[in-house]
Amino acid sequence: MRRIHRALAVSLALLMLLAACAAGPIAPAADPDTPAASTPAEPLPADDPAEAPPADGAAEDAPPEALPADDPTDAAAAGSGFSIRFLDVGQADAALVTCGDAHMLVDGGNREDSSRIYTVLTDAGIGYLDYVVCTHAHEDHAGGLPGALRAAAVGTLLAPVAEADNEPFTDLTEAAAAQGVAVTVPEADAVYPLGDASFQVLGPRRAYDDANDTSLVLMVTYGDTRFLLTGDMESGAEGDLLDDGCDLAADVLKVGHHGSGTSTSYAFLRAVMPEAAVISVGAGNDYGHPSDDVLSRLRDAGSRVWRTDLQGDIVASSDGATVTVTAARNETAATNPTVPPETDAAYIGNTRSHKFHRPDCASLPEEQNRTYFADRASAVAAGYEPCGRCEP
Ligand SMILES: [Zn+2]
Ligand SMILES: [Zn+2]
């Protein structure tokens, strides 16, 4: 499945050497000198050939296939274990990235999610977060992060700005300051280690007025598998990543801006071509997310869609070669309406009206506005109300 990307990578290798964004064939994930848990991480010296790990130097003479990420003996493939848990925080984002004993929390949901974030970390026994990332200074990303800082000490706090005129963000920076941690505003292309994995800050690559476009865009790499986290980046910033020749191919895409039609442009999606697309979105939200346009583009890209509004927490795990995605509930739900359900659905929901019906109801929605539920409880949990006509 990754072969297509690999072939692309090979053919683009020369271009990448010249492109600003090609700072890295991502530096080898396994770094025996990975900082101890109590030490804030420094970005890997991906841009400096003089300091680059030996494997990077070798890459100049070797075809891209020989890079460490492709080596089956790569430490990542040996298996410290890697997962990203996309937390169901309603109309918001929060993702916990774990590689062995290393942890990174990317966004923390809204303020009201603070206690959920706290509980997730304490239940998992995570008392130290190597990184906390606030993709941008909006409440639905920064709001719950103080809960993380109550549960865990933080090594490095990454954000696109050091300060913002925004109370949730100020609460976050104050909670970090109480731990003696200041905001690190990373350079584009910086690469940071995360256990046997690593992540590269692909964006933002320009200054933007719109906070969504300032979102930190992270390509997380574990062995041969890649995960693209985009915050609320919209199509303008997506275009800048493309213009700069960034290698965007990924197995899993966290779909930008909760599935808004202003993100996930065709050109961007063509460069990513994810097997799995995760939409972090609230049931019955006021914005009409995810947009039909984005769902349609994802169908065209052949990506399997996973949705926190319908499926709860979604976990993408990797052994360094293969990605497996699971959901807390409703795993076989038709998450992208015109894709037929994998099982005989007991109830059919209308994604516009958020009513659900029996399959024999006379007022079923148009095909493209349907979503399917295996049982009544799932429909109710997704925020759908029973149709007054068929009374499911
Ligand atoms: Zn936003
Ligand atoms: Zn958002």
Image (tube, helix red, strand yellow):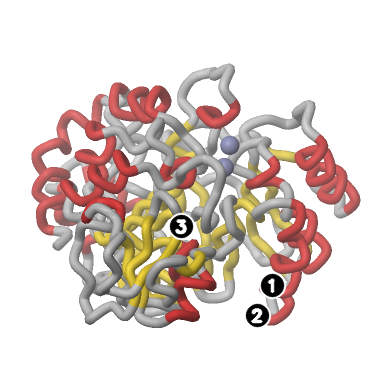
In this picture, residue 386 sits left or right of residue 331: right
Q: Give the label on residue 124, or none.
A: 2
The image shows a total of numbered marks equal to: 3
Is tag 2's residue or tag 3's residue first in the polypeptide sequence? 2
Residue 219 visible in the shown view: no
Q: Is residue 109 above or below residue 373?
A: above
Which quadrant of the figure contains the N terminus?
bottom left
With respect to residue 40, does 129 lie above or below?
below
Mark 1 and 2 residues: CB-CB less than 8 Å, in contact? yes
Ligand 1 shown in quarter? top right
Asked which quadrant contains residue 374, the reply is: bottom left
- Label 3 sits on residue: 354
Instruction: Identify the residue position indicated by label 1 in the image.
Output: 121
Residue 269: % across, % down: 26, 40
Q: Is residue 163 left or right of residue 331?
A: right
Which residue is pictured at 32% across the width and 43% down the height? 292
Amino acid type shown at disc 3: His
Image coordinates for residue 156, horizontal then vertical, percent: 68, 50
From this viewpoint, is residue 110 visible? yes
Task: Mark 1 and ligand 2: say if the CB distance to the nearest ligand atom is below 8 Å.
Answer: no
Q: Nearer the viewer, residue 24 or 346?
A: 346
Q: Residues within 10 Å of mark 2 (few under 14, many from 20)?
A: few
Disc 3 residue crowd, few under 14, some 14–19, many 20+, Cα 10 Å: many
| CA distance for labels 1 and 2 | 5 Å
Q: Left or right: 134 with respect to 78?
A: right
Where is residue 267? Give x, y as percent: 23, 31
Whole-number angstrom distance, CA of label 1 to CA of label 3: 33 Å
> Which of pointers 1 and 3 indicates the residue nearer the eye?
3
Q: Amino acid at mark 2?
A: Ala
In the rendered view, would you say 86 is above or below 328? above
Q: Circle 1: is it few (<14), some (14-19), or many (20+) Cα within 10 Å? A: many
Q: Residue at x 83, y 63 (%)?
A: 150
